[in-house]
Image (cartoon, helix red, strand yellow):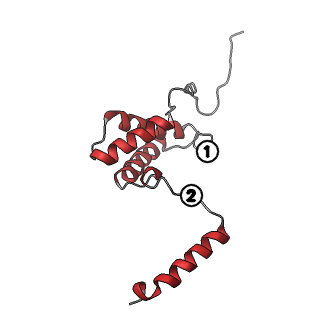
Amino acid sequence: MANTKKTTGKRRGPKPKKTEYYVDPRELKAELIAYYECEECTPKLGDMIHKIAHGLSYSSNFINYTYRDEMVGDALVKMYTAVTNKKFNSIYPDFKFMNLKDGLEYTYAWFCANYKTIRQ
């Protein structure tokens, strides 16, 4: 009798190694600071962005996503846009998150102090 093993569904490839798409946060921060100083994207920074986008595509949320390549491409564009627009915290190293109550008090105090200049 021949081996008649049924295969149903999609074939899954091997899972990528965890280190394959790992990016060291300290190295990424150093590359971002270097980019912000000279406005030149190095191949190392581009490779880091590429690794992050591909690594996220193997997350359990996206493992059966049919348009994974398009998702990775969109992620690359979004991340590069964020880098070029300088949207990362290395620009504001003193930035601290605060709870809602303190944030509202701070915002209200600022608004009251600057009301005449912002409401012209």
Kind of residue indicated by mark 2: Lys
From the top left corner, tell me how far across and down residue 28 is, in percent: 44, 38
Disc 1 designates what residue?
Answer: 61
> Image quarter for residue 98?
bottom right
Mark pair 2, 1: CA separation: 30 Å
At 51% from the left and 81% from the top, the residue drawn is 111
Q: Sort mark 1 into few (<14), some (14-19) or many (20+) by Cα contacts within 10 Å.
A: few
- Image disc number at residue 101: none
From the top left corner, tell me how far across and down residue 78 is, in percent: 41, 51
Judge whether 42 appears above or below 120 on screen: above
Q: Please indicate, yes or no, whether residue 80 appears anywhere in the rendered image.
A: yes
Q: Is residue 70 left or right of residue 55?
A: left
Taking the view exactly as shown, the residue that stands out farthest to the right is 1
Q: Is residue 22 left or right of residue 116?
A: right
From the top left corner, tell me how far across and down residue 53 is, in percent: 47, 41
Local SS, label 1: loop
Foreground residue among 19 and 2: 19
Local SS, label 2: loop
Q: Please indicate, yes or no, whether residue 49 appears anywhere in the rendered image.
A: no
At 48% from the left and 39% from the top, the residue drawn is 52
User: Where does the N terminus fall, quadrant-wise?
Assistant: top right
Kind of residue indicated by mark 1: Asn
Disc 2 designates what residue?
Answer: 96
Taking the view exactly as shown, the residue that stands out farthest to the top is 1
Q: Is residue 110 left or right of residue 118?
A: right
Judge whether 37 appears above or below 114 on screen: above
- Mark toward the start of the polypeptide (2 vs 1): 1
At 38% from the left and 90% from the top, the residue drawn is 120
From the top left corner, tell me how far across and down residue 59 is, in percent: 59, 39
